[in-house]
Image (spheres, coloured by chain):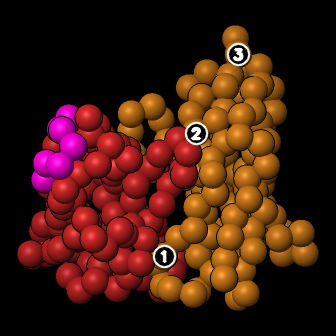
Amino acid sequence: DARVTQTPRHKVTEMGQEVTMRCQPILGHNTVFWYRQTMMQGLELLAYFRNRAPLDDSGMPKDRFSAEMPDATLATLKIQPSEPRDSAVYFCASGPTTGGEETQYFGPGTRLLVL
Amino acid sequence: AQSVTQLGSHVSVSEGALVLLRCNYSSSVPPYLFWYVQYPNQGLQLLLKYTTGATLVKGINGFEAEFKKSETSFHLTKPSAHMSDAAEYFCAVNGGTSYGKLTFGQGTILTVHP
């Protein structure tokens, strides 16, 4: 049963520290999405990639967030420096080549707390 | 532009009662519509989706949804609620503005009482 995996599952850090979240998409999926979920804002799309190239990162604060896909099996989301307002659950999702109707498969999330 | 409105952030039903979760969308092109479910401390998983063809779509766990273009709605129903249905439900739309990019509603938390 193929699944999207995310590490770490939980992260507690202090303000100003760098945070790196990792995602392994389902093998064969060429589209990867990063979402952030908070009580106040709900589910927000931060960035997404197709064939490892960024297609849209307009939802991401550019000054502190960065997203990359070093290879087809790894996507990373970095926050540097982290701030308390970054506390949220971060989800990675992957999907096959999109015409728009394809299902996105979500990982279990990284729960981030910035003190 | 595309958007989704879920009416009711919380819905409470008794076990065995009808479940109705409302979703209205806005899209400038024929949309693809999705319902996802999120159980506590888990990621989202697909319940069902409408792409083309039959407007009544059946999904997992006995859920179904009907695409009504004239009402721009995609409401989710289940005839008889089960305790295990307690979760948060998200409606999402892809209106073709960016392939694969979904716009999610704010979510509806479903509570099921014994």
Tell whether position A41 is magenta.
no
Q: Which residue type does callout 1 highlight?
A: Lys
Chain letter for orange, please.
B
Instruction: Measure how far apart labels 3 and 1 are at the Cα level.
Output: 35 Å
What is the span of residues highlighted in magenta in the rendered image? A9-18
> Which mark lies nearer to you, 3 or 1?
1
Instruction: Measure how far apart labels 3 and 2 are at the Cα level.
Output: 15 Å
Q: Nearer the viewer, residue B59 or A102?
A: A102
In terms of image quadrants, where is residue B34? bottom right
Q: Secondary structure at mark 3?
A: strand
**Residue occupying image coordinates x 22% and y 70%:** A66
Point out the residue furthest to the right here: B70
Q: Secondary structure at mark 2?
A: strand
Residue B88, which numbered label?
2
Tags 2 and 1 in contact by the CB under 8 Å rule? no
What residue is disc 3 on? B113
What residue is disc 1 on? B101
Tags 3 and 1 in contact by the CB under 8 Å rule? no
Question: Percent from the top left, x then y, of residue B83?
Answer: 61, 21
Q: Chain of mark 3?
A: B
| Rendered position, B102 above or below A113 | below
Question: Percent from the top left, x then y, of residue A46?
Answer: 39, 67
Q: Chain of mark 1?
A: B
Of callouts 2 and 1, the N-terminal one? 2
Q: Which residue type does callout 2 highlight?
A: Glu
